[in-house]
Image: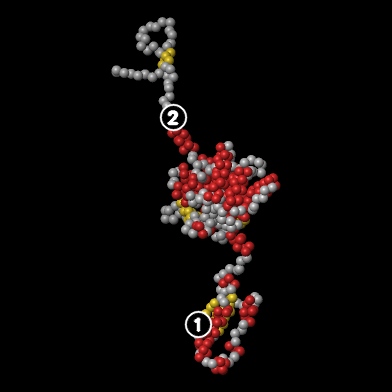
């Protein structure tokens, strides 16, 4: 019979007892030693002997005595070889765990939460100074207190310049406070319509939002504009897009990554790697194509709630060989000295047709679409969001079904994708003409101008009279 002490998962000390081909393993030492004693008594038939016979059988031998000092060495960090050292990661601290939890949280979500809580705390401090009434911390309020103070907050909150918040911003303040409450373990949901404890708060919020809307506050929403087909042609004609320089190559792949694959804002572009794109040349008469394999994005994080959702995978078949050549040349030039499949996709453009190993900075990347449109002389409100809006708008104007549009843009709901679609001027003109009145225009009065002659000789059938704006009706012919 033998003992084996080693370190198991989660840093637990484990003991393995091996006897007569039987291996036993357990976390608790007391249990293991008790089981070992039972096995020894059975093997040596000690349970059938008296005490004297037992001592005669169990004569102490140095090689039979386990080295219990191993346990002490193990616990104080002695040099004992651990099994399966590559199977598990190192022990994590509480800070490490918090960092992992927050690593995939949207930065805008975190900003909204911090902004909401800062605004509430500033209002709370201001109100207590003026009225002298004590307002508890939000997470410490019960439902009755939260209903009262949240009602007063949404009715009294103002921007730093004293102007009222737009209705949407007021609602986002409440969403941020609700998120903060949940993070701190307070599960009171004051936005839940089924929770009657907060009916007074919700009525006050709805009334305030309706009042602001009636005043015209927040009714005009500033949004990024899509790039029209005509404007896109201008960018090609001015060589802003194309393959004439490394800069035009960079602009082109960025613009069409937005339009072909529905990439948004900055985050999806910043995390792009070369390995996410597979370029396939023309083969057996088939057109060349590119496959894009998405990873984490705003609408797909791969967490518990998206176990049955797959990341975006898009196959785009090229019908424009110029665009195919742009992608082919860019990917060739950026991988000449770096064939790492996890290397960054967007590289800093150099003079001529060369690219640095360095990636584009976040500030440059966040204004790339604006720079493209400015260099092309386009007028309008263009930002990186214009790319994804261009994708949705182009497909919508072509009559593509919403489900296929959602597959490209990555939207999870119809309402979300509809916010990105814009009708063309031709569509608006057609709609306008349909709605306008269909009246028959009234003709001007008929006038006859007859030349005045001193005398008329001969046949006067061709008198030279001129008829203007007349309608002739011939009957009985």
Query: Label 2 belongs to which residue?
Result: 437
Q: Quadrant of residue 93?
A: bottom right
The answer to whether any part of residue 286 appears in the image is yes
Report the quarter where the N terminus lies: bottom right
Q: Are the residues flagged by discs 2 and 1 in contact, CB closer than 8 Å?
A: no
Image coordinates for residue 4, horizontal then vertical, percent: 57, 81
Q: Mark 1 = which residue? A: 22
Q: Nearer the viewer, mark 2 or mark 1?
A: 1
Please provide percent x and percent y for residue 369.
Answer: 57, 46
Report the label total: 2
Query: Element at badge 1?
Result: strand
Q: Residue at x 42, y 53 (%)?
A: 285
Q: 104 above or below 59?
A: above
Asked if residue 459 is positioned above or below residue 316 in the image, the reply reads above
Local packing at callout 2 (Cα closer than 10 Å; few below 14, some 14-19, many 20+) is few
What is the CA distance from the residue labelled 2 to the residue labelled 1?
96 Å
Note whether 313 is above or below 465 in the view shown. Answer: below
Residue 135: numbered disc: none
Q: Position of residue 395 (x, y in %)?
A: 47, 45
Query: Which residue, as the protein is rendered here, is positioned at the far left?
Result: 476
Disc 2 is placed on an element classified as: loop
Taking the image as shown, residue 120 lies to the left or right of residue 390, namely right
Q: What residue is rendered at 42% in x and 11% in y? A: 450
Location of the C terminus (image quadrant): top left
On the image, which quarter does residue 459 sit in?
A: top left
Residue displayed at 53% across by 82% down: 35
Which badge, 2 or 1, comes first in the chain's sequence? 1
Residue 458 location (% of width, % of height): 36, 7
Q: Residue at x 51, y 49 (%)?
A: 193
* Residue density around tag 1, few if under 14, some if 14–19, many if 20 or more, within 10 Å: few
Nearest the camera: 364 or 347? 364
């Amino acid at each position: 019979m033998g003992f084996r002490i080693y370190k198991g998962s989660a840093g637990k000390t484990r003991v393995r007892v091996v006897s007569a081909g039987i291996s036993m393993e357990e976390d608790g030492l007391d249990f293991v030693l008790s089981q070992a004693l039972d096995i020894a008594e059975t093997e040596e038939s000690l349970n059938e002997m008296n005490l004297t016979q037992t001592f005669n059988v169990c004569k102490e031998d140095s090689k039979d005595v386990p080295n219990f000092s191993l346990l002490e060495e193990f616990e104080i960090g002695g040099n004992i070889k651990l099994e399966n050292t590559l199977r598990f990661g190192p022990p994590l601290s509480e800070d490490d765990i918090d960092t992992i939890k927050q690593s995939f949280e949207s930065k805008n979500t975190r900003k909204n939460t911090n902004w909401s809580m800062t605004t509430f705390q500033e209002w709370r401090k201001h109100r207590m100074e003026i009225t002298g009434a004590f307002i508890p911390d939000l997470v410490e309020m019960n439902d009755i207190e939260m209903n009262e103070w949240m009602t007063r907050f949404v009715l009294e909150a103002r921007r730093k310049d004293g102007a009222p918040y737009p209705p949407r911003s007021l609602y986002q303040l409440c969403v941020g406070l609700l998120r903060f409450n949940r993070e701190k373990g307070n599960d009171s949901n004051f936005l839940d319509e089924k929770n009657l404890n907060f009916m007074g708060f919700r009525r006050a919020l709805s009334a305030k939002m309706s009042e602001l809307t009636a005043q015209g506050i927040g009714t005009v929403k500033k949004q990024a504009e899509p790039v029209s087909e005509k404007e896109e042609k201008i960018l090609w004609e001015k060589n802003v897009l194309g393959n004439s320089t490394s800069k035009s190559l960079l602009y082109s792949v960025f613009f069409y990554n937005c339009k072909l694959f529905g990439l948004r804002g900055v985050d999806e572009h910043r995390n792009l790697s070369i390995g996410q794109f597979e370029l396939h040349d023309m083969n057996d008469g088939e057109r060349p194509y590119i496959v894009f394999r998405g990873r984490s994005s705003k609408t797909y994080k791969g967490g518990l709630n998206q176990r049955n959702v797959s990341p975006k995978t898009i196959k785009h078949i090229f019908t424009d060989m110029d665009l195919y050549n742009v992608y082919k040349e860019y990917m060739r030039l950026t991988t000449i000295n770096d064939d790492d499949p996890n290397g960054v996709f967007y590289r800093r453009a150099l003079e001529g047709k060369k690219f640095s190993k360095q990636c584009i900075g976040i500030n440059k990347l966040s204004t790339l679409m604006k720079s493209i449109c400015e260099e092309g002389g386009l007028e309008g409100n263009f930002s990186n969001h214009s790319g994804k809006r261009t994708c949705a708008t182009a497909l919508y104007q072509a009559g593509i079904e919403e489900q296929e549009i959602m597959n490209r843009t990555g939207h999870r709901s119809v309402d979300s994708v509809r916010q990105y679609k814009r009708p063309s001027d031709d569509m608006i003109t057609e709609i306008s003409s349909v709605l306008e009145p269909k009246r028959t225009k009234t003709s001007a009065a008929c006038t006859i101008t007859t030349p005045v002659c001193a005398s008329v000789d001969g046949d006067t059938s061709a008198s030279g009279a001129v008829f203007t704006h007349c309608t002739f009706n011939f009957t009985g012919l």
